[in-house]
Image (tube, helix red, strand yellow):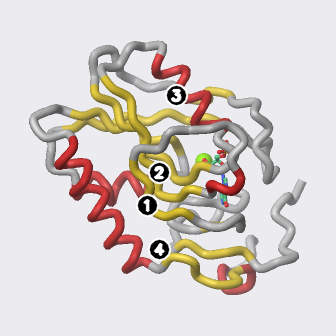
Amino acid sequence: MPPQPHEILDYILIDSNPLRARIAELGRQITADYQGQTLMLVGILKGSMLFMADLMRYIEVPHTVDFMDVSAYGAGARQSSGDVRILMDLHSPIEGQHVLIVEDIIDSGHTMDHVLRLLQARRPASLKVCTLLDKAERREVPIKLDYVGFEIPNVFVFGYGLDIDEYYRNLPYIAVVKPGIDLSHE
Ligand code: IMP
Ligand code: MG
């Protein structure tokens, strides 16, 4: 059994109310920016699923949703290797579409760099990135971010889609792991 959240939680970084308020703002901004267009939201699994579900409720331009699953981390590892694999590709073509990628967090940037190259090659009408969290300090590859929920410090976070060994994605807040908690379990 994985430990209870309170056993590994140092502090709550972003609680559910500020999360909801910021996501509503992002949705309104996206609605304004894509006025008169149709939009295709591309969620990166699995971390983006709660963010996607909440964000799309605030997007009032017509849009479709698709998902892809990519892996940057070896199981349990904490560092992005730069070795990014596509585990599940999109179901629909994106050529000529206005595509907005929806991601939970940009850390080193390797995952998003890979996804952007892959999708750009399919000739979308436009391609932008919306991330809930930006750990800018950790960036190894420069990434242009069009919409950012929160810039966060260099701490390991979990909850609201983000996992530790696949657990805790259901938590309604984003929390920081206690120092000294072993995240690797290899
Ligand atoms: P990047 O390739 O280093 O930018 O890594 C991005 C991916 O690493 C995200 O999609 C997350 O799955 C994962 N990740 C990065 N930082 C954290 C964190 O603090 N908590 C949970 N997952 C994280
Ligand atoms: Mg992820």
What amino acid is found at the position of numbered circle 2 in the picture? Thr
What amino acid is found at the position of numbered circle 4 in the picture? Pro
Q: Disc 1 marks which residue?
A: 149
Say if 85 sits above or below 59 in the image. above
Sequence-wise, the earlier of marks 4 and 2 is 2
* Of marks 4 and 2, the one in the foreground: 2
Question: For the residues marked 1 and 4, what is the alpha-carbon distance in whole angstroms?
Answer: 15 Å
Q: Quadrant of residue 13?
A: bottom right
Q: Disc 2 marks which residue?
A: 131
For the point 79% across and 53% down, the residue is 78
**Badge 2 local density, few (<14 within 10 Å), some, or many (20+)?**
many
* Of marks 4 and 3, the one in the foreground: 3
Q: Disc 3 marks which residue?
A: 116
Q: Disc 4 marks which residue?
A: 172
Q: Position of residue 114 (x, y in %)?
A: 61, 28
Q: Quadrant of residue 154?
A: bottom right
**Badge 4 local density, few (<14 within 10 Å), some, or many (20+)?**
some
Q: Are marks 2 and 3 in contact (CB under 8 Å)?
A: no
Numbered disc 2: secondary structure: strand
Question: For the residues marked 2 and 1, what is the alpha-carbon distance in whole angstroms?
Answer: 6 Å
